[in-house]
Image: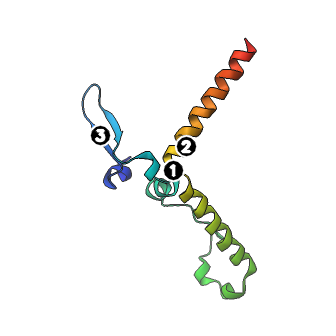
Amino acid sequence: MRQLRLAGITGSIRGARGGHVLLQPPDKLTFGCIMRLMEGGIELGCSRDRKAESCAQLDDCEVHKAWLSLQGSLDSVLESMSLNDILKYEEILEQHNSQVRGGLS
């Protein structure tokens, strides 16, 4: 949570009724932004053991080109999803689950 607080996304309130609060509108916060702050982002690549820069055949490597394409797609998806989208999905899932539980009674 520290990273989110330092970025001005969350704040904290002290006391018995305290906790963390969101300082930015959830529709303005992308999942990609949160992932970069919390985890440093998600980087796809050929090998965990070798850096792509050390590969002598990098410019001609079709696998590397595929990973770059996948990385671009992943980044686009993460940037297209807002925190608000995720909260709405959670509400829809809760409604669905309560309907399923109600049907099982």
- Mark nearest the camera among 2 and 3 is 2
Q: Residue at x 47, y 57 (%)?
A: 33
Q: Residues within 10 Å of mark 3 (few under 14, many from 20)?
A: few
Q: Can residue 46 be seen in this view?
A: no
Residue type for callout 2: Ile
- Mark nearest the camera among 1 and 3 is 1
Q: What element carries label 2?
A: helix
> Residue tagged by mark 2?
86
> Residue tagged by mark 3?
12
Q: Residue at x 47, y 59 (%)?
A: 36
Disc 2 from disc 1: Cα separation: 7 Å
Q: Can residue 50 be seen in this view?
A: yes
Q: Please state if 93 lies on the left or on the right of 28 as rendered.
A: right
- Residue 16: where, in percent of width, then height? 27, 25
- Disc on the earlier residue, 1 or 3: 3
Residue type for callout 1: Ser
Disc 2 from disc 3: Cα separation: 22 Å
Vertical side of 28 occupied by 94: above or below: above
- Residue 58: where, in percent of width, then height? 67, 84
Q: Residues within 10 Å of mark 2 (few under 14, many from 20)?
A: some
Q: Quadrant of residue 74?
A: bottom right
CB under 8 Å between discs 2 and 1? yes
Residue type for callout 3: Ser
Residue sticking out furthest to the left: 15
Disc 1 from disc 3: Cα separation: 22 Å
Q: Residue 82 carries which label?
A: 1
